[in-house]
C-alpha cells in the first residue's frame, strides 16, 4: 500500500515535512524505499525504522538528492549571494560544494531540506534514537 509520509518522529520530537512540494517530491522516494525493503508493518500509520532500514532510507535520500542536484543545480550569481546572503546555505555533498537559496527558491528549499533530513537521520543512527515514519494511506491506490 502506497503511503504519503507526513512527518518523522525522532526520539520524541516530530519533524513535519515542510511543504506540499516536499511531500510530493519525497512521496516516490519513501515508497520506493518501502517497496525495496518490503516494509509493510505499520502500526496505526506509524512505522518504527530498524537500524538497517534507517541506513537504507538515508541511502535512498542521498540518491534522490544527488539526482536533484545533478538535474537542477545552477551556481548562483556571486553578487546576488552577497546582496542576499541570509537566503543562502552552503552544503557539502559527496565531495562537492553547493550554494542553495533556501528562502526564495523551491529547488533550494527542497535540496536543503533533503540534505538536513539526511544529516538528522545520520546523527539519529549514530546516537541510537528511535525514528518513526508517520503516514496516511494514499486513497487513490486502493
Image: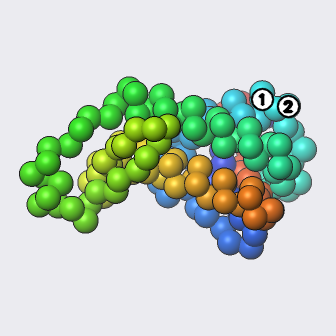
In this picture, is 64 found above or below 81? Answer: above
Residue at x 64% of width, y 35% of height: 60
Q: Which of 61 and 137 is in front in this view?
A: 61
Residue at x 40% of width, y 38% of height: 96
Residue at x 66% of width, y 54% of height: 121
Q: Does 121 sit left or right of 127 as displayed? A: left
Q: Are marks 2 and 1 in contact (CB under 8 Å)?
A: yes
Q: Quadrant of the C terminus?
A: top right
Q: Does 91 sit left or right of 13 as displayed? A: left
In this picture, is 21 found above or below 127? Answer: above
Q: What element carries label 2?
A: loop
Which disc is residue 38 wearing? 2
Q: Is mark 1 on a helix, strand or loop?
A: helix
C-alpha gap between disc 2 and disc 1: 5 Å
Q: Residue furthest front?
A: 95
**Residue 130 location (% of width, % of height):** 80, 62
> Callout 2 environment at 10 Å: few (<14), some (14 to 19), or many (20+)?
few
**Residue 112 location (% of width, % of height):** 43, 51
Q: Does 37 sit left or right of 31 as displayed? A: right
Q: Does 137 sit left or right of 93 as displayed? A: right
**Residue 54 location (% of width, % of height):** 76, 47
Q: Which of 109 and 115 is in front in this view?
A: 115
Residue at x 47% of width, y 42% of height: 93
The number of callouts visible is: 2
Asked whether residue 102 is in view, the answer is no
Q: Which of 72 and 95 is in front in this view?
A: 95
Which disc is residue 35 wearing? 1
Amino acid at each position: 500500500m502506497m503511503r504519503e509520509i507526513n512527518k518523522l518522529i525522532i526520539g520524541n520530537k516530530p519533524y513535519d515535512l515542510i511543504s506540499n512540494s516536499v511531500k510530493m517530491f519525497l512521496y516516490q522516494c519513501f515508497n520506493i524505499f518501502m517497496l525495496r525493503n518490503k516494509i509493510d508493518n505499520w502500526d496505526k500509520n506509524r512505522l518504527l525504522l530498524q537500524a538497517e532500514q534507517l541506513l537504507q532510507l538515508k541511502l535512498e535520500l542521498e540518491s534522490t538528492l544527488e539526482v536533484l542536484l545533478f538535474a537542477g543545480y545552477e551556481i548562483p550569481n556571486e553578487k546576488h549571494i552577497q546582496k542576499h546572503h541570509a537566503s543562502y546555505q552552503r552544503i557539502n555533498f559527496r565531495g562537492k560544494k553547493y550554494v542553495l537559496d533556501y528562502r526564495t527558491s523551491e529547488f533550494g528549499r527542497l535540496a536543503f531540506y533533503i540534505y538536513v533530513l539526511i544529516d538528522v537521520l545520520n546523527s539519529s543512527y549514530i546516537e541510537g534514537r528511535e525514528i518513526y515514519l508517520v503516514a496516511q494511506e494514499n486513497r487513490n491506490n486502493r
